[in-house]
Image (cartoon, rainbow, N blue to C red):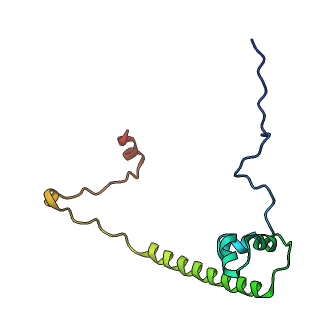
Amino acid sequence: MPPVMPSRSDHVTSSRFERRLPGGKHDLIFKVAFGSDGAAARVFRVSRMTIWRWRHEQAAIPKRVLDDLRSSLQTKVEEARAAQNEFDNFLKLPAKPPCPLSGCCAGLHRKTKKIPTTPEEWAALD
């Protein structure tokens, strides 16, 4: 019987989707505020590399950028709260009744679905 080769748990080459560098200290701030380095670069009219340097604290973030980040984050927080309130209001609404049947099925009635609640009803399904 040939010897079994042990499997390796670690790969020699890393996945192309794996992050090569650790995340910057300000990654989350820029991600939430703008979504990507390119979007932030367009807003501030700088290169994506400059945004990367700001995120990784390789260069000081200018005061005007910090002010814009603060206002942008505040706007995102307000939008998220409004969306959460709207979703909560949607969940509080009663379920809509089914649409009336049309065409050849107009005279028929839908049967209401009965969900089993007791062990006997569950056993009857099998």
Residue 14: give x, y in percent of width and height. 76, 46
The image quarter in which residue 98 lies: bottom left
Position of residue 61 in the picture relative to residue 68 (left or right) = right
Asked which quadrant contains residue 8, the reply is top right
Marks counted in the figure total 0
Q: Quadrant of the C terminus?
A: top left
Picture coordinates of residue 117, whole percent (x, y): 40, 52
Q: Is residue 108 above or below residue 68?
A: above
Q: Viewed as shown, does residue 20 lie left or right of 95? A: right
In the image, 18 versus 110, the foreground residue is 18
Q: Position of residue 84 (x, y in %)?
A: 55, 76
Please give left or right for residue 122 compared with residue 67 in the image: left
Residue 49 is situated, as x and y percent measured from the top left of the image, at 77, 70
Residue appearing at x 38%, y 51% in the figure: 116
Above or below, comparing residue 42 to residue 10 in the picture: below
Q: Which residue lies at the image location 85% right of the left edge and 73% below the top edge?
A: 57
Identify the residue shown where x is 70% and y is 75%: 41
In the rendered view of the protein, which quadrant contains the N terminus? top right
Return the residue nearer the eye: 12 or 46.
46
Front residue of 52 and 119 = 52
At x 67% / y 73%, what residue is drawn? 32
| Up/down of 44 relative to 126, above or below | below
